[in-house]
Amino acid sequence: MPPPVGGRVDPADFEQRDRRAEDPWSFATSPYELDKYADTVRAIGAQRVPSALELGCSIGVLTRLLAARCDDVLAVDGSRTAVAAATRRTADLPHVRVASALLPEELPTGRWELIVASEILYYFDPPLLDGLLDGLEARLTGDGVLLAVHYTGEAPDHRLTGDEVHDRLLNRPALAVTHDRHCPGYRLTRLGRR
């Protein structure tokens, strides 16, 4: 695996994967992924969410599920090929916007009631991750929720393990944990402002 670029996995690696396969991680067909997505949506809670930001949306499988619970969704990814696929997947949903964004530099401005970081935060080294988390905290509304879900196994391109990412989230002074659960193969953490 190539070394990180500026503290993260080279975004060109994702672009190449997305060009080689329509669904490189089997997001649309893997029982593991589909169960994890269902668990993620359940963790949002019963209330309807006015606005959501999804980081690393890939081909938009989770984006569609979030759209069923949210009035407005902005989904971003660093791979233009993935953005095009997610745009096609959500084309019938006028309240969903999909955009290209290289994180953390192009983290969208605005404020959201829900920010979802699924399978993305471990691609950053600790200093870059801490800066990104600062940005996410600033974009949460007062009663907003940050929902993080990450694979807990080993992967050669991860800069941190899923547990290391979630442990860093648990130690953020401005965030209070409302849900933290180890599941088979992944960890799901829900946080709000203190």
Image (cartoon, rainbow, N blue to C red):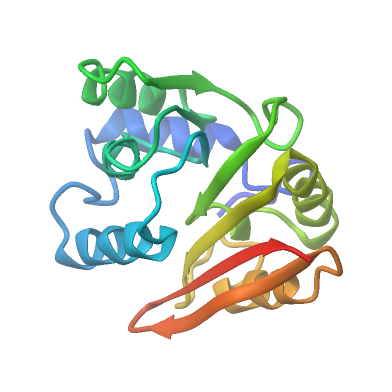
In the image, taking residue 37 as reference, residue 107 lies left or right, namely right
Point out residue 15 in the picture as x, y percentages from the top left corner: 45, 30
Residue at 22% x, 66% y is 35
Point out residue 4 in the picture as x, y percentages from the top left corner: 70, 49
In the image, taking residue 131 as reference, residue 100 lies left or right, namely left
Q: In the image shown, does 175 or 171 lie closer to the viewer?
A: 175
Residue at 22% x, 25% y is 89
Badge count? 0
Task: Please identify the quadrant where the N terminus is shown.
Answer: bottom right
Task: Name above or below for residue 82 compared with residue 5.
Answer: above
Q: Quadrant of residue 104?
A: top right
Task: Name above or below for residue 142 compared with residue 75.
Answer: below
Residue at 51% x, 49% y is 116
Task: Name above or below for residue 80 compared with residue 49.
Answer: above
Point out residue 61 in the picture as x, y percentages from the top left corner: 27, 41
Q: In the image shown, does 95 or 126 lie closer to the viewer?
A: 95
Q: Quadrant of residue 21?
A: top left
Task: Name above or below for residue 172 compared with residue 27.
Answer: below
Point out residue 69 in the picture as x, y percentages from the top left corner: 33, 43
Q: Quadrant of residue 70?
A: top left
Q: In the image shown, does 176 or 161 lie closer to the viewer?
A: 176
Q: In the image shown, does 104 or 7 lie closer to the viewer?
A: 104
Task: Please identify the quadrant where the C terminus is shown.
Answer: bottom right
In the image, taking residue 124 as reference, residue 181 lies left or right, namely left
Residue at 21% x, 51% y is 26
